[in-house]
Image (tube, grey):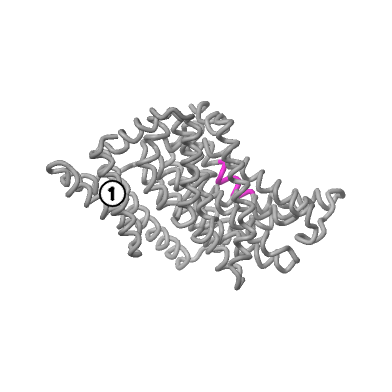
Amino acid sequence: MQPETILYTFLIVGMLLAIMATGTWICFALYGTAIFALMFLGRKNMEGVLESVLFNSVNSYTLVAIPMFVFMGEILIKSGCSQYLFRGVRKILSPFPGGMLHTNIIACSVFSACSGSSTATTVAIGSVSIPELTKQGYARPITFGSICSGGTLGVLIPPSIMMILYGSLTGNSIGKLFIAGIIPGLVLAGMFMLYIGIACLKNPAWAPGRTSFGGVQYIKDVLSSFLDIWPVVLLIGGIMLSIYTGIATPTEAGAVSVLIALLIWVLIYRTFTPKLFLDAAKDTLIINAQLMVSIIAARALGMALSLLNIPSELSASISALPVSPYLVWAMIVVVYVLLGCFVDGIDLLVITVPVFYPIMVLGLGFDAIWFGVVLTVLLEMSLITPPAGFNLLVTHSISGSKDLMETIKGSLPFVIVMLFALALFTIFPGLATFLPSKML
């Protein structure tokens, strides 16, 4: 790298860290750093790009999918969908080792496939699950850990708000990213359940006795469970099939999903009230506004870095190193794990993608869709790594526990499981790229 580029890099990173250290919101720290870079480090009139960044960053048809899927998730939360979903899944999984702990993972996986939000999933399922499992005698740490980890599946199993942001920032297909997350999401959910089963077999006191697989009653329970979960299955299937077959774009699928969710709320759950509807719209507006500010800030900083040639020179320098690309990837994983202990997932995404995407995809030649999936897994980990993991704090707040360490102890084994999953997706990238390659 040129000495000038190295100096600019240190100045920009130093400025960003200095602003963040004051407690400023990260989106404003990013934008302030971008203004500093464009006005004081760049060439003449570089600050003129700010006007176009402000408008063009959010003037995007692709980004319309975000408020649509957020609104759908808010509708499902207000409708009480999670209660029916949890009850239906519980009937199927209670005989397995770990019993109703598996219900947390499956219910979170299904709900997250509708809401696209980890926080929404954690609150919706956790508020129903935690009191029930605590009453039945399940160990509190693994109960909290299963809710934390299950909630993170909301950013991997489509529709995923983080994948929409990644696709918007990098110019990749949102539809392909959505479809690419299906197999890894199911694999990760399966690995979570495998850990729960093994842990409960080794520690029988963590879960009460299981119900029997045999008998007519279990068959009746399984059949009756579909009465509780079929509306959600219909919604998920409609979204995925419309995108995979090319009938609808992700934005169009988001709009249709809102309509289906409203019909389910009004005609099936019958809990619709004007007040709840206005609350859902209000929450959607607030969440979307926060995300748009983050996108503008990320685009502004990305533009500053690009005009200063930092990503291209950094990518070229790392690509020229006499080391394996997988060693570089391993170092990037370590960086994400460390940053994830202190920075929220969405903020981490908008901060790092302008730097690491050129290195991994343009420099080292990794597949852009694959990188989007494994990056999402890394961002999932940031949600459950102490001390600032957002799902940790959310789970702790709804659990009624006075000891945060209960939630941390229960979540750390799931972090290790996610690292194994990350290694698996790196060794077998086809798990993420097979379905997108078959899209129409």
Residue nearest the viewer, comparing 289 with 67: 289
Name which residue lies at 57% across and 63% down: 395
Residue for point 75% across, 66% down = 137
**Residue 141, horizontal then vertical, whole percent:** 66, 62
Q: Quadrant of residue 314?
A: top left
Q: Which residue is the extreme one toward the right? A: 215
100 and 342: which one is in front? Answer: 342
Q: Horizontal and vertical percent for residue 144?
A: 63, 61
> Residue 138, how many percent across, how many down?
73, 63
Image: 336 above or below 121: above
Type of secondary structure dominating the magenta stretch = helix
Q: How many marks can you see?
A: 1
Quick check: is 30 in the magenta stretch? no
Return the residue nearer the eye: 253 or 131: 131
Residue 231 part of the magenta-drawn span:
yes
Task: Tell me the kind of residue under disc 1.
Answer: Ile
Name of the residue lying farthest toward the left: 44
**Circle 1: is it few (<14), some (14-19), or many (20+) Cα within 10 Å?**
many
Quadrant of the rendered image containing residue 407: bottom right
Q: Which residues are magenta?
A: 230-237
Q: Where, quadrant-wise, is the N terminus in this rendering? A: top left
For label 1, the residue is: 12
Looking at the image, residue 247 sits to the left or right of residue 23; the answer is: right
Foreground residue, 18 or 380? 18
Asked if residue 141 lies left or right of residue 26, the reply is: right
Instruction: Classify 196 as above or below 368.
Output: below
Helix, strand or loop at mark 1: helix
Quadrant in the rendering for residue 187 = top right
Question: Residue 127: percent from the left, percent from the top?
Answer: 60, 65
